[in-house]
Image: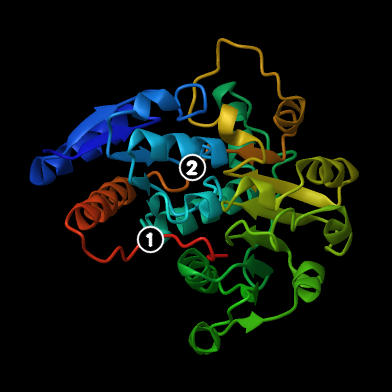
Amino acid sequence: MNTRIAFFDAKPYDRESFNTLNKEYGFDIRYFKYHLTNDNVVLAQGFDIVVIFVNDIINTEMINKLADFGVKLIALRCAGFNNVDLKSALNKIKVVRVPAYSPNAIAEHTITLMLALNRKIHRAYFRTRDSNFTLDGLLGFDMYHKTAGIIGTGRIGKALIKILRGFEMNVLAFDKYEDEEYARQLDYKYVSLDELFSKSDIISLNCPLTKETEFIINKDNIEKMKSGVMIINTGRGKLIKTYDLIQGLKSGKIMAAGLDVYEEESEYFFEDLSNRVLTDDILARLLTFNNVIITSHQGFFTREAMHNIAQTTMQNIKDFVDGKELVNEVCHKCP
């Protein structure tokens, strides 16, 4: 029988990329518009595999229901896996992911946020649309010889460092697993978190969300930073304690913030809420700052990345169906 796949949180661009590739694979895919939740998990009944995205939260209860329904594989079409209870899935349902769909896409988006905030591009755009061509309030700084602190030097962090070194910026890095050879090649330095916080003009978060990194940007660590620091987060929302970020913005300790992710984004990002009142008071407060740019988790969103996501996800599924080794399987012991 043909492999049946329940595809949740399906957007038009998901359907396009997966349907194009499915001409090669021939899977029976049923697309569902909404997130997979405990209320609608019954929709997965009769399917062999579920495909989910970053904001589909799969807890123990849902794992048990999926297993009872006969689901044998959860295929994450993203790199992060903190939204799935892996311990509950162990020995019940296999979990696979897409570890690297386009490090360059996210690194380039990180640079976009840095430059836009520094040169006030978002403010200049709206100003000139109103025929206001003054420069007051748009003063930026040279990136040249400034210090960037990069937390996380995986594929994305390394791609970002390569671009920053092209600006001839000084780069300090922190990672649990240091790559000294790459540091020598690109001429950057691994340091302690405290040193990174105290010396960086711009701090970028490019690490996974773990127990060690959750709320790594908090009140105590913000106090260690330079006055006028810029913070960029294209990693995971809960790397930042948003309330503490807001206090830092209000005090002027933080000069600007670029956020492609948000602590409580699951109910908002990827959705059109323009006809509703925004009920998240903290997100609404962030949106009032003219020195904050929020993008809705779009760092990955390039043609190349979408193709890579679909290709890897479909290959993960095919390997599972064919009984092959799952090279992108997520283990419950993963950090």
Query: Which residue: 26% across, 66% down?
Result: 325
Which is nearer the eye, 48 or 270? 48
Which is nearer the eye, 30 or 1? 1
Q: Is residue 15 above or below residue 76?
A: above
Q: Position of residue 123 (x, y in %)?
A: 64, 34
Secondary structure of residue under mark 1: loop
Res 115 label: none
Query: Which residue: 75% across, 34% down?
Result: 289
User: In which quadrant is the C terminus drawn?
Assistant: bottom right
Q: Position of residue 48 (x, y in %)?
A: 27, 39
In the picture, measured across the screen, residue 95 lies left or right of residue 323, that is right
Q: Position of residue 89 (x, y in %)?
A: 47, 50
Which is nearer the eye, 56 or 185? 56
Mark 2, other Cα within 10 Å: few <14 / some 14–19 / many ≥20: many
- Looking at the image, tell me whether mark 2 or mark 1 is earlier in sequence order: 2
User: In which quadrant is the N terminus drawn?
Assistant: top left
Q: How is the image coloured?
A: rainbow
Alpha carbons under labels 2 and 1: distance apart:
16 Å
- Residue 125 seen in the current view: no
Res 54 label: 2
Check disc 1 and report the residue beneath it: 329
Query: Which residue: 49% across, 42% down?
Result: 54
